[in-house]
Image (cartoon, coloured by chain):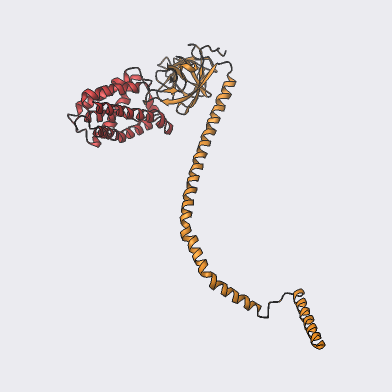
Chain colours: A red, B orange
Amino acid sequence: MLKIWKFQISLFGILFAAILIEVGIIPLVWAPVRIDFLIGMIIGQIIFVPFSQGFPFIILSSIILQAFSGARIGLIPLIYIAVFVIIDVLKNVIYLENIFTQALLGIFFYSLITSVTATVAGSRFLEDAVVPMVAGMGLTALLTPVMVSIVGRLQAAYDVYGS
Amino acid sequence: MVRSNTRIFLLTCAAALILVLLSTGRHYPSTLGISYIREGYYIFDKVITSPFSFVAEIWDTYIGLVNTSRENKELKKQVETLRVRSMTLEELKSENRRYRAMLEFKNQRQDLSLIPANLLSHDITLIFKTAVIDKGFNSGFRMDMAILSPDGVVGKVVSVSPRTAQILLITDPNSAIPSVIESSRVKGVIKGRGGNLLSLEYVRSTEDVKVGDCVVTSGLLGFFPSGLKIGYVQEVKKDANKIFADIVVKPYVEMDKIEGIFGIAQNMEVSD
């Protein structure tokens, strides 16, 4: 039980580090670019963590993310829970452990989340933010397998869930 | 004995005379073999000192390189340190420039009660345009407080905690500010388009709006005092079949580059 707590606390530590990079460091380098670190963590949770513990983690993570966004309360958790459920269903159809699949899922969900939030908010961001969006998509594709691997390594390190 | 003394005396005088003549006359190359003595001394010196010089040279050029390498590393470290210090100084210089601009703006707008703050982070999503600042309730920031920068209007406070506040930038699609075109006094509402541009909405197609017109706050809602610069008209599209013109406004403030901002205290006095 203690191992599970340690594992979950480490995951939240990584989440906070990712948020710090996303809202503080990346905007310093190139202000309009946003990278989605959570997609990789969601895939990692689905592969390595039982649903009963992965799902609460995603709910809590998305609530934390909500604090750093101007989106209406509930929109961010709703989107990420939907992503979690969709990928959980997809795990029976596609091989999630493949890094190319993970990268493609990163691109797909990044564009899906951006489109949904843009539609909900009535944003016309594509007028002058196509390049940052494409860059963000590419970087998310690169980082999704990395985040999956981090979750996997943590799970192996703490030796939880009978791996 | 007397003759002998006289001879010695005369020889000494002759030798002295020769020496006087040699030392006071023009300098001729030595013809008395003195140069060969020097040559001999040179060869002797070389033979004796060469092994020592050879050892000294090896010591200096090879073994001494160990020290040179160490010295090189030290110097490299020093260069790095100086480079970092130079960067820090540049950053301090730019920070100083920013604070000076903020101070000048504060002095210019003494009619407003301004609270300075710095930007902490940007919005986590690509679509929404909010930012978090390093001052909150404890510093006097309140909900709906107008946020300015020396260049113009930035947004308003939408969430406040004791030490931080979240501001909704004017470029966010949810932002709407009653505004007016400075020259023609045509009224409208400035709304965010989600990117880096704004829309001036609810302006009739019949109104006289030109590219380059300055858009300022109208002061209607009360959060923003009137006359604060928002942006300038970048594009005007008029359609005979539409009641309202499609006006694109470019904000004066570059939202991606804001660092220092001001909150206008709630007990503000309206400028005009």
Residue found 55% across the figure and 30% down from its top: B96
**Residue A104, quarter of picture:** top left
Q: Nearer the viewer, residue B114 or B74?
A: B74
**Where does the image place residue B132, in percent across and percent down from the top left?**
43, 23
**Where does the image place residue B240, in percent across and percent down from the top left?**
42, 17
Give the side of residue B89 with respect to residue A69, left or right.
Answer: right
Pick the quarter of the image with the C terminus of chain B: top right
Vertical placement of residue B246 versus A31, above or below: above
Residue found 52% across the figure and 30% down from its top: B95
Residue found 48% across the figure and 27% down from its top: B259
Q: Nearer the viewer, residue B248 or B41?
A: B41
Vertical placement of residue B61 versus A145, above or below: below
Q: Nearer the viewer, residue A6 or B130?
A: A6
**Where does the image place residue B24, in percent across and percent down from the top left?**
77, 74
Pick the quarter of the image with the N terminus of chain B: bottom right
Residue B210 in sight in this render? no
Residue found 47% across the figure and 45% down from its top: B77
**Residue B3, quarter of picture:** bottom right
**Where does the image place residue B257, in percent across and percent down from the top left?**
47, 29
Give the side of residue A1 with respect to residue B195, left or right.
Answer: left
